[in-house]
Image (spheres, rainbow, N blue to C red):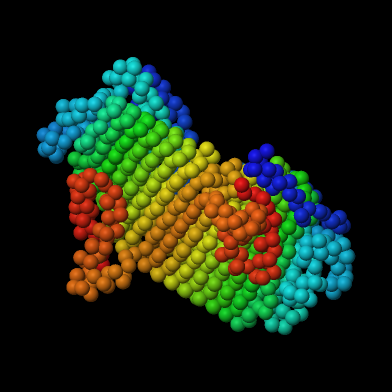
Amino acid sequence: MVESLNLEKSISRELDKDVKLMKSNTLKNIKGSLKTYKEEYKYTPLFKKTANKIQINDSKLDYDIEKIKSSIPKNDDYKIIVIDGLYKEELSKIPSGVLINKYSDLSEDMKGEFQKAYRGFDDSKKDIFSSINTINHLECLTICVEKDVNIKNKISIINFTNSTQSSYFRKSILIKKSSYVSFSEEFLGSTEEISFSNSVSEIFLDENSKLDYFSCQNFRKNFHFNSINVFQRKDSISNFHTYSFSGATIRNNLNILLKDKNCYANMYGFYAIKNKSHIDNHTTVDHMDENSISNEHYKGIVEGGSRGVFNGKIYVRQKAQKTNAFQSNNNILLSDNAKVNTKPQLEIWADDVKCSHGCTVGQLDEDALFYLMSRGIPKKEATSILLSAFSSDITEKIEDDNLRKHYEELILSELEGLNYE
Amino acid sequence: MSKDDKILKEFTSKEYEHGWSVDFDVDQAPIGLNEDIVRLISKKKEEPNWLLNWRLEAFSQFKKMKEPDWSNLNIPKINYQDISYYSAPKKKKMLKSMDEVDPELIKTFEKLGISLLEQKRLSGVAVDAVIDSVSIGTTFKDKLSELGIIFCSFSEAVKEHPHLVKKYLGTVVPSKDNYFSCLNSAVFSDGSFCYIPKGVRCPMELSTYFRINASNTGQFERTLIIADQGSYVSYLEGCTAPMRDENQLHAAVVEIHAEKDAEVKYSTVQNWYPGDKNGKGGIYNFVTKRGICFGNNSKISWTQVETGSAITWKYPSCILKGDNSIGEFYSVAVTNNYQQADTGTKMIHIGKNTKSKIISKGISAGFSQNSYRGHVNVIKRAKNSRNFSQCDSLLLGNTCGAHTFPYIDIENKSSMVEHEATTSKIGEDQIFYCLQRGIDEENAIALIVNGYAKEVLKQLPMEFSVEAQKLLSLTLEGSVG
């Protein structure tokens, strides 16, 4: 199956010697990354659906730049604009203290710094779609947040997909010592046709740094594969917020490696899906050293003929004593045609730890519904109130007031589209 | 020497209590696995043609299958050609009463602490003892037969009640189900058969003891339990094996069929030889256990205490086909030294208003790896189903591992499923509390571990509960720092 993808072509056009080597090594190991496919994609057989779209377009794509410009929010916020995997400097606005470049344009010194992130710890050895991204991506966007920089306002990363085939986006983020940055990533499609977007990121958090990362996935027709790989050094903090809504097949891989002591990682996710939507969240937290904390909470509302998949893995290595790791996944099923597949997985080799996971699949509490209805609130409205209360566990974790309001409104409008009866 | 080291040393120096072997005259099949062996086993057991054909079909399927590799186990390569597939104490004549049983054999049972006579008199347990594949003596048969209960060895059932065996054999665990059940279907030697007629409540606990005695004999027993409408039975299984250096293969199949309103309770205490402190030897235990709640309102309950075997691969499961049926799984799995266990359950909800409960307690010590693997599946038509799962792990020392792999697949909106799991060590405050009240550390640990496992232990029938508690405290003696 892999042979038919003609991946060699993407390698042959690569100019950078090191990147070319990385690509050809990935191709050599691609059989290895297929080994886990059967288990990891048990409920999301993405490969079959996308195999005919995996190649990249040769011809340069035409797109209506004015149309894209009009869909970029007109405000002074910092933003990084990417079209079909290629960075558009002229449309972007970057704060000082943040350096954005294509990998190929970096100086040798900077390339050296990015080596540990780019080509360091992504999951292309284990995941077939990450492998394909590694081989097929045209350029890697590098984002470097300099030492001791505190960027209060969030930076939006907006991806436009025009291709009717597939688009590959690759970025590498380096957050240096004692810095803080917040990203909000969005994917927008400008075509009505079904396409496949594949995004892989590596994020390196140096000592004492902090990251907030929001991703909002509101595709209508796309297949979307998104892999985020995080490497944390001592005393660093990362917060991930993932919101997925209806209309597409989405697969999220979020892999966090807590390499040093005293790391802190939070992962929050919410999904509300209907029709034939399919959301698959796969997360991994690997505790390598002492005194780290990881906290994971995913919640979802599944309606229509949609399917919600969750797989959370927590590894606690032998050295990682005094680890605290929590994981929980709650689902509400609103339809008999909807499905939930969840697998919260723990693997622990250290004894002095506190680890727990929990997961539930169920419905709204009938007593609560009855209480609201007995006070004159119509059923639909009452259901909506209870569902937004269900989601508030996740949204309340957003520290930024404006952003929280934004997501709350988004969820509310999404919930109105659901069919409760 | 640090405290942990000291404890480890004490812990690992514990010899296997049941490690002995008695030399009977053994009738053993030549080493190897081929069609002739399958025919030989069938012939030795004087089986009818349909059963031979069933075995042969399973064997031809087995040749096409591959060993499963999905488990979280490190299984050394097993040479299936290097095992003798049949071993039976030589039959001298038909035994009419217990007095005719080989005194050596009775001694064997006494060593195991299950003296047939003693049990007959005191506990009222009917024991069908299986040593190396052939059922030797069955007690209380007359009393049971008065009620119409059939409790006998599998080979006897094939002879005496072929229609029942033919009707139910392979209906819950089809021969092609998995690699090991397929092997079992081809070469199974003996086992127990139990049939409870309509509306009968079995007045005593039925019990069977398995022992793997001859060296290098894989034991492949097959158990079939049929509970007809409205009946009840509690079935106990205990296993021990003497110390042998080479690994012995054990691939059993247990099938339970529960009709309308029937209830079956199946309890296991397994303390097969786990290998020595360096992980050498020990039993490989690859067991397929499955029950079907065929009729409405039926119930199947599995309880297991697993302290033995070098490798355990075992998932007692329930298919909840009848409406309102109930499946339960209670498990304590203890691993020490280099033991590996990958065990859990499957609850397949098919009928409406079906309920299942999973309580799994894992305890790992030494260099062992202990995994829970479970699957809860509620299909679309299983409206209003309910599952609750709890799997806790206790780690003693930092060289062992505890793993949890729960699969939860839900396909309708009226069902509720909850799963929770925790992993921790014994709380220092708990130990402190005990010490403060004059209980020494070892006893404190035994107390805490027994308390931890109590939810499962209390499910066991009295006789087993005592044995299991003793086993737990013994295995864990001095294992926490």
In the foreground, B43 or B462: B462
Q: Residue at x 29, y 39 (%)?
A: A212
In the foreground, A389 or A72: A389
Q: Give the image location of residue A262, x and y in percent.
A: 42, 38
Q: Residue at x 49, y 53 (%)?
A: B422
* The image quarter in which residue A361 lies: bottom left
Q: Give the image location of residue B144, x and y in percent.
A: 72, 79
* The image quarter in which residue A377 lies: bottom left
Q: Residue at x 72, y 52 (%)?
A: B273
Q: Is residue B423 left or right of residue B447?
A: left
Q: Is residue B137 left or right of residue B466?
A: right
Residue A388, can we see it?
yes
**Image quarter in which the N terminus of chain B is found:** top right
In the foreground, A382 or B6: B6
Q: Residue at x 80, y 72 (%)?
A: B118
Count of marks overlaid on the render: 0
Q: Is residue B137 left or right of residue A267?
A: right
Q: Give the image location of residue B69, x and y in percent.
A: 57, 45
Task: Please say if B394 is above or below A62.
Answer: below
Task: Please say if B206 is above or below B471.
Answer: below
* The image quarter in which residue B224 lies: bottom right
Q: Give the image location of residue A158, x and y in percent.
A: 22, 37
Residue B84, can we see it?
no
Spot the residue most to the top: A108
